[in-house]
Amino acid sequence: MGRWDPWRGCHRCSEGCKFCYIHKGDAKRGIDTDAIVRNENFHRLIAKKKNGEYKTKAGLIYLCFASDFLLEDADQWRSECWDIIRERADCTFLFLTKRIERFMQCIPEDWGDGYDNVVVCCTVENQENADRRLAVFQNLPIRHKQITAQPLIGAIDMEKYLEGIEAVTVGGESDRAARVLDYDWVLDIREQCIRQNVSFYFRQCGTHFIKDGKQYTLQVKNLCSQARRAGIDYESKTETEGML
């Protein structure tokens, strides 16, 4: 498992960006997040050792987690990224986007019905954006599709969009002023996934968390561990059977 950020910086584009970890981290370091900059290690994944082997091992690569891979400002660099992704067929690249409506403008000519080593994860945070983005997402030529509802800031009915989705990940918001996460919203999405046989993962609680009608304030360091303790992850039958 690795990470590759060919560029850094992003622009807030929806309600889910309010307490974005990229902007918060940059603010602490005095960096202007709205300045989109190509990283010096752009070609890191195709750098080789003297024996000809790649320095970066094969495996899962989290792509562009310091930005959005479909960001307009990065259009000039994306084709070169596709070249690298195509060369590193031994790696699986996963990226998240809130700009799924730009997808068809951003793919390479040989995309076809998708690269087998690319997982596209559409991010949603509430019903309005789920309906807008997932209606587009469900019709796109992508071999491996996932949905991330993180931060989840309201109940979402996404069941009609789950056909062809491999996994849904849910999580709350992390900030002193974070919007509340109601555990009932999490459980409801889980039930939708189970009915449609889609894998479900609860990644983190919210700083402000409601369970059984009672509100709790949790420390940031405990958000992920508390979610794991809930023990509600669900592996789709197809995925489980494939592992046997």
Image: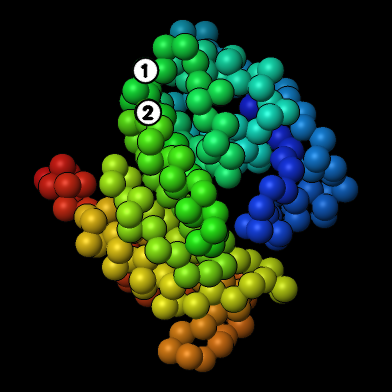
For label 1, the crowd category at 10 Å Cα-Cα, with few meaning under 14, some 14 to 19 and many 20 or more, is: few
**Is any part of residue 49 visible from this angle?**
no
The percent position of residue 130, horizontal first and vertical second, equals: 49, 54
User: In the structure shown, which secondary structural element does the residue marked by tag 1 occupy?
Assistant: loop
* Kind of residue at badge 2: Pro
| Residue 202 versus residue 107 in the image, above or below | below
Q: Report the disc number at residue 141.
A: 2
What residue lies at 63% left-to-right and 57% top-to-bottom? 16
* Kind of residue at badge 1: Gly
- Judge left or right: residue 242 versus residue 211: left
What residue lies at 36% left-to-right and 73% top-to-bottom? 187
Q: Nearer the viewer, residue 57 or 96?
A: 96
- Judge left or right: residue 237 versus residue 175: left
What residue lies at 71% left-to-right and 35% top-to-bottom? 8
- Residue lying farthest to the right in this orientation: 30
Q: Which residue bears the numbered disc 1?
A: 112
Q: Are marks 2 and 1 in contact (CB under 8 Å)?
A: yes
- Looking at marks 2 and 1 on the same chain, the residue that comes earlier in the sequence is marked by 1
What residue lies at 52% left-to-right and 30% top-to-bottom? 103
| Residue 112 versus residue 240 in the image, above or below | above
